[in-house]
Amino acid sequence: MDTDNKFSPLSNNMEQKPSQSQEGKSRFDFSQQSQSKSVRGDAKQVSFGGEKLLVIDDEEMSLRYLCALLRNAGYGISATQSPEEALKILDDEEISLIVTDLKMPTMSGLELAKNVRSDSRFENLPIIICTAFVDREIIQAAAKLNVNGYVIKPINKNVLLEKINAIFQVK
C-alpha cells in the first residue's frame, strides 16, 4: 500500500489522505506521530490498549466525527465509507469492535452485521449500529443478529463511549 493514499493525521495536524477503494469510496487509516506505531506494510497503525475499532459510514462528515471522537478516547481506528471495504479490512486487520452506520447505499449496517456474523471468525465480534432512524423492527432485527449496541444520531459521545467501554469490560 502506498502511504500517499492513506489518511494520516499527524499529532495535532490533521493531514488526511484518503485512498479510493475499488467501489470508489474512501478507506481511512489513522495514526498519531507521538504514539508508538506498528507497521503493517507501508501503512502505520496505532493501537491503544490493544483495541482497534473499524468505523463504517458512507457520509464523510459523520465518519470523520466518529473517528475523531473514538481516536480522542484512545482507540486505534480503521475506517471506510464502504461496507464492502469493511469486510476486506476485517480479513486484513485485527479488529476489536465495529461501529457502523445503518443506512448506506450499497449494503445496510444490518446486512453488514449479517455478513460479519456468517463468518465463524467474527461471530462474536462486537458491533454497534449508529442511525438516525428509530424503528422497532430494525432494533429487533439488530437484536436477532446479536448486535451489541444501537446508538441514535446525532451521536451523543458519552452514550457511544459508555456502550463501547461496557463491551470491552465484559470481554
Image (spheres, helix red, strand yellow):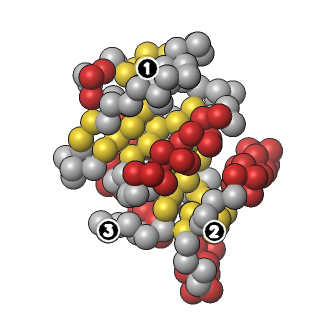
Binning the other alpha carbons within 10 Å of mark 2 as few (below 14), some (14 to 19) or many (20 upward) gives: some
Residue 148 in view in this figure: no
Q: Position of residue 54 (x, y in %)?
A: 50, 44
3D distance between C-alphas at marks 1 and 2:
32 Å
According to the image, label 3 marks what residue? Answer: 105
**Residue plotted at (62% across, 43% down):** 69
**Residue plotted at (33% across, 17% down):** 42
Q: Nearer the viewer, residue 21 or 132?
A: 132
Mark 2 touching mark 3, by CB under 8 A?
A: no
Write down the quadrant of residue 107 in the picture.
bottom left
According to the image, label 2 marks what residue? Answer: 152
Q: Position of residue 105 (x, y in %)?
A: 32, 68
**Residue plotted at (64% across, 27% down):** 48
Q: Position of residue 151 (x, y in %)?
A: 64, 65
**Residue plotted at (27% across, 22% down):** 4
Quick one: SS at disc 3?
Answer: loop
Mark 3 touching mark 1, by CB under 8 A?
A: no
3D distance between C-alphas at marks 2 and 3:
19 Å
Q: Is residue 77 above or below residue 84?
A: above
Three-letter amino acid code of the residue under disc 3:
Pro
Tell me the quarter of the image containing the C terminus: top right
Quick one: SS at disc 1?
Answer: strand
Three-letter amino acid code of the residue under disc 1:
Lys
Binning the other alpha carbons within 10 Å of mark 3 as few (below 14), some (14 to 19) or many (20 upward) gives: few
3D distance between C-alphas at marks 3 and 1:
30 Å
Q: Is residue 73 above or below residue 135?
A: above
Mark 1 touching mark 2, by CB under 8 A?
A: no
- The dot on residue 4 is none
- The dot on residue 44 is 1
Mark positioned earlier in the residue sequence (1 or 2): 1
Tell me the quarter of the image containing the N terminus: top left
